[in-house]
Image: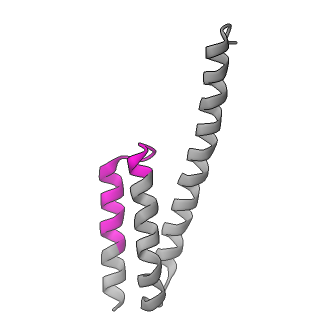
Amino acid sequence: MANHKSALKRVRQSATRNERNRYQHKTTRNAVRKLRSLSDAKEATKLLPEVNSMLDKLAKRNIIHANKAANLKSSLQRHVNGMK
């Protein structure tokens, strides 16, 4: 276990951030799954910008790689465009 006050604080901070990152990552994955399962083009078009924003935030915070976010956004856009 950590011996210094600063190390104890760092443990608390990293645990809090890890929990937040896991929550945001899981929420985004569920949103992606929901978007892929939609069959209504109007509903999918409405949800797409929200999912794109979530993916951009994950990439910005290095929770996922920027290229992975770009690939997901591209495939989701193709999926939505194919509905129209």
Q: Does the magenta stretch include residue 56?
A: no
Residue at the image point whose x is 46% and y is 70% from the top: 50
Q: In which quarter of the image is the C terminus?
A: bottom left
Image quadrant in which you'd find residue 74 = bottom left
Going by the picture, which residue comes out furthest to the top? 3
- Residue 11, horizontal then vertical, whole percent: 64, 24
Q: Quarter of the image containing the N terminus?
A: top right
In the rendered view, tell whether residue 50 sits above or below residue 37: above
* Total tally of numbered discs in the picture: 0
Q: In this view, does 4 lie above or below 31?
A: above
5 sits left or right of 78 in the view:
right
The residue nearer to you, when weighing 48 against 36, is: 48
Residue 9, by quadrant, is: top right
Identify the residue at image location x=43%, y=44%: 61
Residue 37 in percent (x, y) is at: 51, 78
Of residue 5 and residue 20, the one placed in the foreground of this image is 5
Q: How is the image coloured?
A: one colour
Estimate the x, y position of residue 71 in percent, counting from the top left. 31, 60
Q: In this view, does 79 lie to the left or right of 54?
A: left
Q: Position of residue 81 (x, y in %)?
A: 31, 84
Q: Is the magenta stretch mostly helix, strand or loop?
A: helix
> Does 59 appear in magenta?
yes
First to last magenta residue range: 58-76
In the image, is 11 to the left or to the right of 67?
Answer: right
Residue name at image x 61 percent, y 51 percent = 23
Q: In this view, does 57 lie above or below 43?
A: above
Residue at x-position 41% and y-position 42%: 62
